[in-house]
Image (cartoon, grey):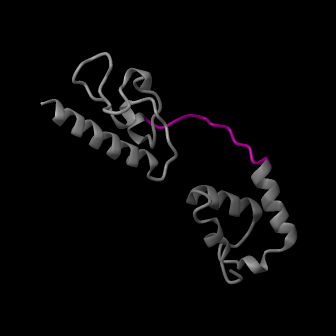
Amino acid sequence: MKDKKWKAFLDGLFEDKFAGVITDILKINPSKRLSDVSPDLREDFLKLMIEFRFEIIGTLDFKDSMATAGGADVREVNPETFESKIVKDLYLTGELLDIDGDSGGYNLHFAWTSGYIAGQSAARRQ
């Protein structure tokens, strides 16, 4: 850990561009070893993380979205089959449902699992 570099420390904590902004604000060389970061600079980093403010000035197009929210109300779907309670033989899975999860594979896992269950349920109806 003592030879770990500042940039490696920020990897995984922040997106690369934001990590660069933090590094620039604190005027830290990205290749500086963590063991060489002064206690005052560590304190400045913690203070920046607590007090950092920014203005959101817009969004990208929908095609650039990483996640969506909303969808069919889960109370209108049978949780054991994912069949709609309103429209017979209509199965709703994944992000078609109003279920939001953390990024990092959780939404994908739910999409695959709910799709599998819906597929199995639909096949049994035939």
Q: Give the residue drawn at x 45%, y 48%.
A: 106
- In this rendering, would 87 be left or right of 102? left
The boundaries of the magenta stretch are: 51-61
Residue 18 covered by magenta stretch: no
* Percent coordinates x, y for residue 9 in the rendering: 65, 69
Closer to the camera, 120 or 26?
120
Q: Is residue 40 above or below residue 84?
A: below
Q: Main secondary structure of the magenta part?
A: loop
Q: Residue furthest left?
A: 126
Q: Give the residue drawn at x 47%, y 38%.
A: 60
Task: State the image quarter where residue 26 is shown.
Answer: bottom right
* Percent coordinates x, y for residue 118 in the rendering: 27, 36
- In this rendering, would 39 be left or right of 10? right
* Percent coordinates x, y for residue 63 in the rendering: 38, 38
Residue 58 covered by magenta stretch: yes
* Percent coordinates x, y for residue 38 in the rendering: 84, 74
Task: State the image quarter where residue 87 is shown.
Answer: top left
Q: Residue furthest top?
A: 86
What quarter of the picture does the N terminus occupy? bottom right
Q: Give the residue drawn at x 16%, y 36%.
A: 123
